Image (spheres, rainbow, N blue to C red):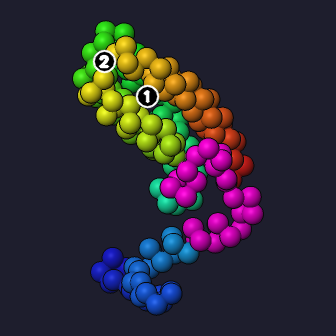
Amino acid sequence: MDKYLILIFGIYAGYTYIYTINEFVITKLQYLMKEIRSDQFVFHERLNATFLEELFEGDTIYAETVFEDFLRDLPAYWEKVQTSYQHKNLTLLGTNIHTCKTLFGYVGFTDLQELCQEFENKCAIHTAEELQADFAALVRKKQEAQHIIENEYNRLKRYNEGA
């Protein structure tokens, strides 16, 4: 079978798709599995569900892994944020916030991602004293987000065990 390339043509919404037989079988099985499972996973309302659906394409096992990575990595990155803030090293603080901003994006906290971007920009033009209120607000939002992601991770884990 390796000597032959079998192609299957599919037409959907005016687009022509060309699949190898393996791609066709995998694609159709994934589609059928989505249709069979009536309890589709719905992300928390604070998360950008549209973004996450596009990112994970219905793969809740991949989503679980990303959420688990977030929970594992965030404490170390946030410690760097705290340290750079305490030492009033605003250049480093901006860099560390940038890293956290990326992490928040991967779990669908696009509003917090935007807040991190705004704070990162402020690090370049304000003093540490001027950033106190903004930093305190960012810490609160981070704690709320971390709690939501912990719950979502546990929900994903339970969902995938029942899948």
Q: Residue at x 30, y 23 (%)?
A: 126
Tell me the mark number nearer the camera, choosing from 1 and 2: 2
In the rendered image, residue 36 lying in the magenta stretch gets the answer yes
Residue 128 locus on image (x, y percent) = 34, 15
For the question of whether residue 52 can be seen, the reply is yes
Rendered view: 61 above or below 6:
above
Secondary structure at badge 2 equals: loop
| Residue receiving disc 1 | 73
| Residue receiving disc 2 | 127
For the question of whether residue 65 can be seen, the reply is no
In the rendered image, residue 5 lying in the magenta stretch gets the answer no
The disc labelled 2 sits on which kind of residue? Thr
Q: Which residues are magenta?
A: 29-53
The disc labelled 1 sits on which kind of residue? Asp
Classify residue 154 by image quadrant. top right
Q: CA distance from mark 1 to mark 2?
A: 28 Å
Q: Nearer the viewer, residue 130 or 141?
A: 130
Q: Residues within 10 Å of mark 1 (few under 14, many from 20)?
A: few
Rendered view: 21 above or below 26:
below
- How many numbered markers are drawn? 2
Taking 111 as reference, is 144 left or right?
right
Taking 134 as reference, is 126 left or right?
left
User: Which disc, if any, is residue 26?
Assistant: none
Residue 3 locus on image (x, y percent) = 30, 80
Instruction: Point out the tag, 1 or 2, that comes first from the N-terminus.
Output: 1
Q: Nearer the viewer, residue 58 or 98?
A: 98
